[in-house]
Amino acid sequence: MGRFLLRRALTSLLVALGIVFFVTLILDLIPGDPVLIILGQNATAEQVAALRHELGLDRPLVVRYVDYIGRALTGDLGRSIMTKRSVAAEVADAWPNTLLLASAAITIAVAFGIGLGAISALRPNGWLDFGVRILALLGLSMPIFWIGLVFIYIFGFYLRLLPIGGSGTPQHLVLPAVTLALPSVALVARMTRSSLLEVLGEDYVRTARAKGLAEPVVLFGHALKNALIPVVTVIGLQFGQLLGGAILTETVFAWPGLGRLVVLAIFARDYPLLQGIVLIFALSYVAVNLLVDLAYAWLDPRITYA
């Protein structure tokens, strides 16, 4: 286990370094000059040159990348061009909100996705199974921003049951969490159904049924745990994507998280802030995948890490 964790830590470090370099390269290729955005079009050449030197934009790409990595290892992610605050402070303010939103969404996805998938697998090809598959298809097909706008109209304007934006109370979390969770609910439900149907055809399940065990006991006591290994993989990947993919949801509902901050940083061409947020997203995704790998051993003791 120790060797496995060490290998994964080294791999995670290489992934994070590669992502930061890729983001640095993309930002360098995007048209537009952040210096002119800050100073305005009427700035003199001397002012532009001075600020470009202060921000380090007059140095080669590789030099800027190596310098950024060296400072990041000490916790210095730079200073935001947009707010003049340290990037670490900006991330620290917004990260808990994104983590709360993603955690609420994945909780909804796990509870409803596994439940609907199990119900569908127990009565395959019946009307209930057909209904669950239709709902899953709809959940995967509808864009998140469209779902969010529909929820805002129904629950915010028409029924006036829930706030349509901002944060501060549990009610503010409901609409963005459900909106973000729906595609994941659909994906988890479909994966649970297919995996459980495969497990329910195994010999040990037929033996349990032949012994006269009730169907819920067969399902939850014998089949479900073994069927969860591919489902856990999907859940882990979905959680990582929710952490880094909540941009549309946070923008639609004005949720003050990292996703909304990414949009503001892109429009302001705030290189340091954007690099810092992407680095946090990358490390979060890698950490979630490590936890998924460790969960395999709990679900199936036959899995070992050499």
Image (spheres, rainbow, N blue to C red):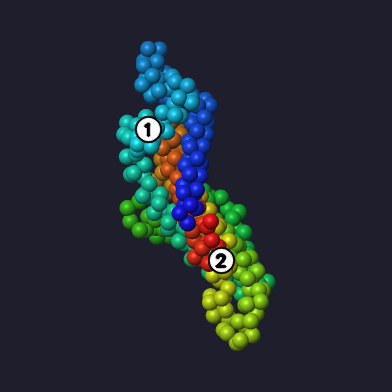
Residue 52: percent from the left, percent from the top? Answer: 40, 20
Residue that mark 1 sits on:
71
In-front residue for pair 193/9: 9
SS label for mark 2 = loop
The image's mark for residue 3 is none
Residue 106 appearing in the image: yes
In-front residue for pair 301/38: 301
Residue that mark 2 sits on:
302
* Residue 21 versus residue 48 in the image, above or below: below
Extreme-bottom residue of the structure:
212
* Residue 159 versus residue 88 in the image, above or below: below
Residue type at the position of mark 2: Arg
Residue 304: percent from the left, percent from the top? Answer: 54, 61
Please tell me which of labels 1 and 2 falls first in the chain: 1
Residue 80 appearing in the image: no
Residue 88: percent from the left, percent from the top? Answer: 34, 39
